[in-house]
Amino acid sequence: MREPIFTGAAVAIITPMNEDGTVNYNEFEKIVDFQIENGTDAIVICGTTGESSTLTEREHLDCIKWCVDYVAGRCKVIAGTGSNSTASAIELSQEACEYGVDALLVVTPYYNKTSQRGLIAHYTAIHDATDKPIIVYNVPSRTGLNVLPATLKEIAKLPRINGVKEASGNLDQVAEIHELCGDDVNIWSGNDDQIVDVLERGGKGVISVLSNVCPQETHDIVAKYLDGDIEGSKELMQKYMKLAKNLFCDVNPIPVKEAMNIIGFNAGHCRLPLIDLSQENYDLLKGTLDEYGLAK
């Protein structure tokens, strides 16, 4: 059995920006405190939702180091350090390990992609160059590359591969991973609308966009299920399903960043090429947050 780096809900945290586009660390403190005070089990820094693709390498590393220092052991910190270049992923991962992260979240190569054999070589190289647990991030809708269950089983022979963030949306694949790999691969949902579905197929929790706005509720969906209150978990999931879906009314993280502004944080804007919500989608999101009593 491979002990999961966390069970429950990890927030795929946004990166708040000042008006000039620089990282707003003063607001970051407030957002991190809000997460920890409301039950978040882990913070994923510099993932997709954190706009890692438009941070410079220096900003990326500075955010990771800042987060480790500011969290100061209050919850797990997992750093997004993936790249379509294995060498770049190794460099980011090594520095993140030096900063004291609890684990690494490493997305599959994108754009240049690779073969299934290439995936094994990619993760083996990163694993062998680092000393922290690694979570494989499988999100074919963004990368154009799917980690097959048999490939994941091979990758999991590496001792510090802790599991997979499964965002393929394919629940049959999730079930196959669990059947094939058992407790050697921890599974976390990468889709907020499938939290309970993944838990039913052996999952340990979620790495969540919804958690930015509703950290306690997202934590509770998982905690109730794992504590045996399956009906309570399903009821809470159903209650927040509309919000979970509407946080994806546009390209992530555009809606969730605007949602954080609407609920009272100074999250700022996304960096180009991501642009603000259309008026139609803004009204949809604001109306949804009003329904949940979250809008300020």
Image (cartoon, rainbow, N blue to C red):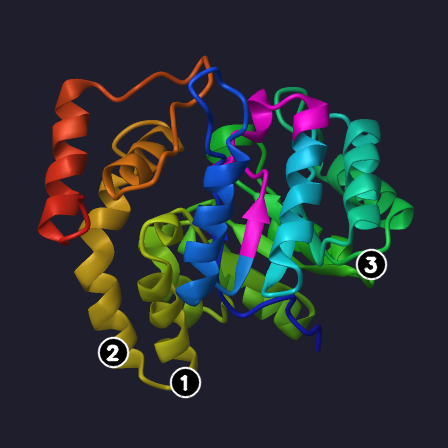
Q: For residue 167: magenta? A: no
- CA separation, marks 1 and 2? 10 Å
Mark 2, Cα crowd under 10 Å, few <14 / some 14-19 / many 20+, is some
Element type at mark 2: helix
* CA separation in Å, label 2 and label 3: 37 Å
Q: Which mark is residue 56?
A: none
Q: Is mark 3 on a helix, strand or loop?
A: loop
**Mark 1 lies on residue:** 227
Mark 1 vs mark 3: give the one in front: 1
**Left or right, residue 253 beside residue 121:** left
Looking at numbered disc 1 in the image, what kind of residue is underneath it? Asp
Displayed quadrant of residue 262: top left
- The residue closer to the viewer here, 171 or 248, is 248
Tag 1 near tag 3, CB within 8 Å: no
Magenta region: 43-59
Which residue extends farthest bottom?
228
Q: Is residue 144 visible?
A: no
Amino acid type, callout 3: Leu
